[in-house]
Amino acid sequence: MSAQNLLVELFVEELPPKALKTLGEAFAAALAESLAGQGVAEANAAVTNFASPRRLGVHIENVLACGADKPVSTKLMPVSVGLSADGKATPALLKRLAALGADETIVGQLRRAPDGKSEALFFDSVAPGTTLTDALQRALDGALGKLPIPKVMTYPSPSGDGWETVNFVRPAHSLIALHGSEIVPVTVLGLQAGRDTRGHRFEARINPLAIQRADSYASQLKDDGAVIASFAERRAEIVRQLQAASTSLGFKPIEDDALLDEVTALVERPNVLVGRFEAAFLEVPPECLILTMKANQKYFPLLDAAGKLTHQFLIVSNISPDDASAVVQGNERVVRPRLADAKFFFDQDRKKTLESRVPGLAKVVYHNKLGSQGERVERIRAIASWVADIVDADVALADRAAQLAKADLLTDMVGEFPELQGIMGAYYARYHGEDERVAQAIADQYLVRRDETGEVSNLISEVLQIADRMETLVGIWGIGLKPTGDKDPFALRRHALSVIKSFQLLGAMARESGTEMRLDLNELIAFSLSVFPAGVLADNVAEELRLFIYERNANQLAPLFGAEAVAAVFANMPPLHDLVKRLRAVREFAALPEAGSLAAANKRVGNILKKAEGEVGSMADPDRCIEDAEKALFAALGDIAPRADAAFAAGDYTASLQVLAALKTPVDAFFDRVMVNADDPALRANRLALLNQLHQTMNRVADLSRLAA
């Protein structure tokens, strides 16, 4: 059972580049997990995955040729059923033993052991360990079945007569399975395992290439096959070459991990080259040029020290000729028409104003239940104007931004590059003399991720984002297209987070200016519902949507403040802009020595009040406080409640909670010495009123009972 390293490689036709990294990781992980589960590999064995455009592979260290034998204990039947009164085997026991390949000669070796309330017979045996051949065959079959394949291809089996087919992401041509230097005889996708693979299509020194042993795979492919098999190593090499080439020019490449992964999946041995285009194309907005180069050609645009786009770009080639000029010229020749198209679209689009395009939105369907984009724009305008008035923004500018927000959907540039919607609208708005705040709002409307901290630099942008998100949330939710599980095709979860962020920013702005935050979520939802035609939306949208937005915020904040603190604050459903401030206060309160005792007492008070019969008063009568402990609690509340209320009213939630610490001693004494449910109804009612007074004082910032262990 000697342990040696194992190599498995599946050589295929070019794999989908955007899926290659995931496929390589999943293939390696599934094989390693299965082999470990079958006892031929260690659970923590070193695993190296290989993924290139034409291969998936894995190298696993210390794999056994055969797993260890395993003791097996098989329960047969109760002793009373298997053995007669004189200890002889019954026919039932003999039949069961025969099914296991044993006979009556082993009856004396059977083990008796308790089994519940009775005693049972057990047959102890040793199962031989799994061979690597069997284990790898099962692992391969299972791994291929679990691969996250975007789309399966059906093609004739390599071992068949043309009638038999197999299914895989791309046609497979060879299989390597080496344990040390020995071939493991497994089959998959109609292929018999061997040791041959193929290197680079054009630059391999030896093709086909016979892999001598598992440990020489990567080096042989690199030296003789001109292929860097490791995805991570190939990616690192591309990064190194990109940095070297850009540094030599005094520029820096655009950082794009998704593009880097995709390019890594397109080449087997990268060679970075420098290309150029005419500087005249730089008159086109850089977003257009960058998207053209990245999306269509997989180039890395270069930026100067000021972050401005240059007329040079980096090409990641899959070949390394002695004279690369033909490769560079070919790429420059291909990109030039793309850039010319972008310039043509830009020039043509500027011939019409955004305002002149707005009527055309009436012909663009938004959703068959919600009408056209033109109707949607009118709803957004109404919401934007209402929000602008509430937050003291310029209503006319907010309405203008909402009116023009979707007009660029009808431009040639956005038709070619939908990713540029909003961005191009801002360029065209500026070109035709719109207010800068309107142009910026049009550009900002599609922002999906904003910094955790920040400030409102353009109030019109904030208004338009709220209006756009709320129209989508209310409309899509209202026609029943709610998020389910991991499916959220209309990004309603993301829209909810954007609304939350806007409330936080507007709340911070109001605090800094010393004004009141007047925008209310319930009122916003209600107004947003009102702009839709009657009968289009479901009846229960308002409450469902409010709970959905709060739930999204709770999920977002729980990792930062803890589930208990979030539950305590969200129990009161405070204004969205206040949540983080209250959470910070609760976190500080929870660190006080008195917090645990007060939280437990608060929970007890809440339970008592829930069980109380009839209406409970909100203020105790001091003349009915007869016990010293209840007099002390009433006096403490008289001193502490006004201070806590004043701090709460001032928005100082930390101070409001901190003063509650002084209540610990009188509260503890009250519960130690006072019987709340006294026989005298008047006395009982007064004590319940005192507890209700305490409960209201303690729970203004948050429901502190949620902090109880």
Image (cartoon, rainbow, N blue to C red):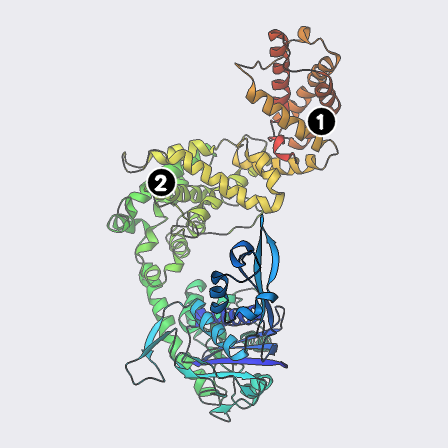
The residue where tag 1 is placed is 659
Residue shown at 74% from the left, 15% from the top: 629
- Check residue 54 in the rendering and tell me which mark sits there, or answer none: none
Is 196 drawn above or below residue 511 in the view shown?
below
**Near-viewer residue (191 or 414):** 191
The percent coordinates of residue 598 (x first, y second) are: 69, 28
Q: Residue at x 63, y 7 (%)?
A: 680
Q: Say which residue appears at 52% left-offset and 72% top-offset.
A: 31
Residue 426 in the image, given as x and y percentages of width and height: 41, 53
Q: Residue at the left extreme?
A: 363
In front: label 1 or label 2: 1
Which percent across, then down, holds residue 202?
Answer: 45, 89
Please, what is the three-letter code of the amino acid marked with disc 2? Arg
Q: Residue at x 57, y 46 (%)?
A: 454
Q: CA distance from mark 1 to mark 2?
A: 47 Å
Please state if 42 lies on the left or on the right of 34 as rendered.
right
Q: Position of residue 354 (x, y in %)?
A: 33, 51
* Residue furthest to the bottom: 206
Please indicate, yes or no, whether residue 374 appears anywhere in the rendered image: yes
Residue 381, numbered circle:
2
Label 1 or label 2, whichever comes before in sequence order: 2
* Corner quadrant of residue 664: top right
Secondary structure of residue under mark 2: helix
Give the farthest residue toward the front: 86
